[in-house]
Structures are given as C-alpha cells and as structure tokens.
Image (cartoon, helix red, strand yellow):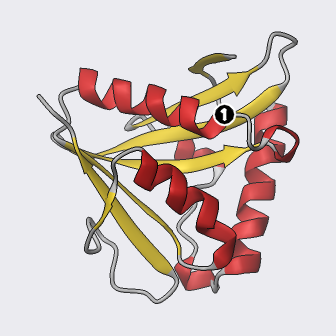
C-alpha cells in the first residue's frame, strides 16, 4: 500500500468522495453532515492523502485540516468498499497522525456520526487512542454527531 498526497480532484477520488457524501446524507440530516467537498479539501490548510495498491487502485482517503497552530481535525476518512477490513483506514490514520506530530500539533480531533453505520469508525478511533470529547471548533452539540480527540505527545 502506498499512501501519499494527492489532488482530491482526481477522477477516482472524486467518485469515492461523492459516494462518501451520499452516504453521509443518507445517514444524517443535512445540518449534521460535516464532510468536505472536493473544493474544500483542496484548500491550503488541508493535507489530503490517498492510499493505493501496487496496481494504482484507490483503496481509501483521509485528510488533516489545521484548525489552529496546535490543533488539527481529521476529515474525509473513507475506504473503498471493495477494500474494507484490510487495514486501509488504520494505515491512512497512522500517516495523518504522523504528519500531525511532525507539524507540532498538540491534539487531533474529529467529528463522526452516532448511528450504527459509524460503529467501525468508532472502533478505529478508540483503538487508535482517541477519546470522546465535547464539540470543538465551530461544532455544536448534535444528536447525530460524536466528537473524539487525541492528545499528541511532544
């Protein structure tokens, strides 16, 4: 598996992100969907990664958005359905956390859904050391949102 920075406007990535947004809208009311579209994932404060296999097939994606000089947010974590359960998300997450550490962020937070659909994501984040927290940044309490944070060691 090769994980590297890629342009989220690449055709196969766009298709995966559109699937991601469609699923988020199917699971949550519009005001509770916080996934970023391609244009927002291309903003300068966002680092976007894609995981590919040796044949170049897209396995999954993830992004890290800087909130402040010491706090970043995980965004757009998505694994291609054909490759779920193979450690793609954990590998992308590990790479994003390494980038966060290199940049000197003190913590990384995220917002995800509360529904059963998100159970695998909850397990991934909890296995990776994230703990539930209060809403951060511009988020507010929402019955469809669960918030996690991870303190990074210096």
Point 69% across, 71% down: residue: 117
Looking at the image, residue 54 lies above or below residue 90: above
Q: Nearer the viewer, residue 29 or 144?
A: 144
Q: Nearer the viewer, residue 150 or 138?
A: 150
Determine whether, in the image, residue 18 is placed left or right of residue 6.
right
Instruction: Name the quadrant of the C terminus.
Output: top left
Q: Which quadrant of the structure image shows residue 59?
A: top right
Point 37% across, 33% down: residue: 97
Determine whether, in the image, residue 13 is placed left or right of residue 31.
right
Q: Which quadrant of the structure image shows residue 136?
A: bottom left
Q: Secondary structure at mark 1?
A: helix
Point 47% across, 89% down: residue: 143
**Mark 1 surroundings within 10 Å by alpha-carbon count, few (fewer than 14), some (14 through 19), many (20 or more):** many
Q: Nearer the viewer, residue 56 or 86?
A: 86
Instruction: Tell me if I can see residue 42 in this picture.
Output: no
Which residue is labeled 1 in the image? 88
Q: Residue 68 at what x, y percent from top left? A: 20, 47
Instruction: Name the quadrant of the N terminus.
Output: top right
Point 63% across, 54% down: residue: 37
Instruction: Tell me if I can see residue 64 in this picture.
Output: yes
Point out the residue furthest to the top here.
54
Point out the residue furthest to the left here.
154
Q: Residue 32 at what x, y percent from top left? A: 54, 80
């Amino acid at each position: 598996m090769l994980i590297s920075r890629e342009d989220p406007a690449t055709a196969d990535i766009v298709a995966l992100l559109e699937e991601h947004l469609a699923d988020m809208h199917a699971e949550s009311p519009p005001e509770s969907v916080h996934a970023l579209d391609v244009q927002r994932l291309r903003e300068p404060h966002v680092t976007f990664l894609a995981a590919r296999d040796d044949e170049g097939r897209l396995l999954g994606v993830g992004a890290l958005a800087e909130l402040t000089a010491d706090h970043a947010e995980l965004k757009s974590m998505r694994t291609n359905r054909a490759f779920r359960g193979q450690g793609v998300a954990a590998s992308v997450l590990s790479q994003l956390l390494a980038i966060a550490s290199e940049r000197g962020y003190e913590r990384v937070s995220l917002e995800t859904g509360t529904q059963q659909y998100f159970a695998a994501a909850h397990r991934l984040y909890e296995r990776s050391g994230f703990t539930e927290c209060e809403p951060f940044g511009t988020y507010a309490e929402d019955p469809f949102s669960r918030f996690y944070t991870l303190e990074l060691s210096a």
